[in-house]
Image: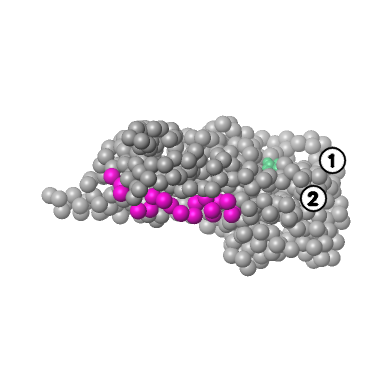
Amino acid sequence: MHKTNSFWHLILLSSMVFLSCDRSTKTTLFDKLLPLPDSTQLEYQKMETIGFIHFTINTFTDKEWGYGDENPEIFNPKKLDAAQWVRIAKAGGLKELILTAKHHDGFCLWPSAYTEHSIKNSPYKNGKGDLVQEFVDACRKYDIKAGLYLSPWDCNHKDYGKPEYISYYRNQLTELLTNYGEITEIWFDGANGGDGFYGGANENRTIDRKTYYDWDSTFKLVKKLQPGIMIFSDAGPDVHWIGNENGHAGESFWSSINRSELTIGGSDQNYLNTGDPNGKDWVVGQCDVSIRPGWFYHKKEDSAVKSPQELIDIYYKSVGRNAVLLINLPPDQNGLINPNDSASLIAFKNILDESFSENLAENAVVKASGFFNHDPFYKPENILDENTSSFWAAATDTASILITLDSATGFNRIILQEPIHFGQRISKFDIKAEVDGKWISLYEGTTIGYKQLIRLPECKTEKIQIRISETRAIPAISFFGIYKSSRNEP
Ligand code: FUL
């Protein structure tokens, strides 16, 4: 009997592992139907921090949004070095960079065959330059992923608002996704329509956000040209905007959401910020924020670069709330990232490395209220190893875990992770510690997801209890760690 059970369990498990590679399929892992990430979304989430490069003609006009009538001759970065951007991003721990190939003003950083409003009519490299190529080459050289931003709104193009512009837009996408090797992310901005040059019409144009772009066909084209690419937009399909530009995910954040309720450029920002526990689609949350007040470089903001501590706070509120953090580093008019920005980013990375350098629970003893099917595959000790594919799964919908440390240990940071390849399950938990013979509450939380980072005043204890009190399905945890950061501030 026992053998038969194990046999069927093995079959079920291998089919779950197989099914988890295909997001369109729901799994019956243990007892419930849950949306699951596909393998590219899982890999994407593991990057944790990525970077944005906002650079275009706005850098030379000192504006955030261009009008579309800017003269390409003003675009002339004299010391541009895309390798400098990538080296700084790498030193700051960023795993991917996304370049604004075209912002709302329509100026193209590559010599597009479909417009004269591009780098080919600028003095940069006597009109022979191609910044998309330089960017992609630098990313390859330093082994960092390369993504592109192509603004759907275009204030320069005469046909913006008419069907003809959609062909233009898709032609440009085809150039970018055909001529530059592997592109790992395409960023579709939600800002759309407004005042612009529009080929000399100088007027206000609006579009119907729901129908104008026929996004489904555009997404199909993108995936045909680059099957492994991640598509970002307010509505996914792979990655969605978090609903603000401060880099903060909701305190509760579900990777599940209903895409049918989302419109690019017109979604409920609170819904984007929390996701939806009953959502049917798995879409990774992405928190975009600029290291400066603006997205483009302005000299007057040299003294307003976010401090390493501000970036750390954003990290805890993005990566630490189950999302991916996208930090913008805007090069200046010479085409270089300012030393204030790079110093802050690198100091941020050093603080993170120091804070999480040693897991003080590594050798703890772990006991749980039970584990699934009494199968050692799901044993509680699995939460101590950093391999997120091994995990503890409970026997029931609510559960608790007791962690006993070698000796009384001081810590002020906790990491918790769910094995999200089997969905996001936990919606309420709390953590207690035994101090002087009494159990005191350390933290009360809701979602965990890929990663939950908890900051606490320092606590010294030998015993920690995690109680999981509300779930969407039998709970599972893939990692638990405690750390002592030398920074006591939250
Ligand atoms: C917004 C744009 O309007 C900003 O200029 C910037 O590109 C930001 C990332 O997205 O919607």
Identify which residue, 272 or 24, lies in the foreground.
Answer: 272
Q: Position of residue 191 (x, y in %)?
A: 69, 39
The answer to whether one can see residue 104 in this image is no
Highlighted magenta segment, given as a residue range: 349-367
User: Residue 81: horizontal and vertical position, in percent?
Assistant: 74, 63
Residue at coordinates 51% horizontally, 35% vertically from top-left? 251
Three-letter code, disc 2: Thr
Which one is closest to the eye, mark 1 or mark 2? 2
Q: Which amino acid type is shown beneath numbered disc 1?
A: Ala
- The answer to if 450 sits in the magenta stretch is no
Q: Nearer the viewer, residue 227 or 422?
A: 422
Tag 1 residue: 201
- In the rendered image, residue 451, in percent from the top left (x then y), is placed at 46, 45
Q: Earlier in the sequence, mark 1 or mark 2?
A: 2
Q: Quadrant of ligand 1?
A: top right
Q: Secondary structure at mark 2?
A: helix
Q: Which mark is residue 59?
A: 2
Q: Is residue 89 above or below residue 239?
A: below
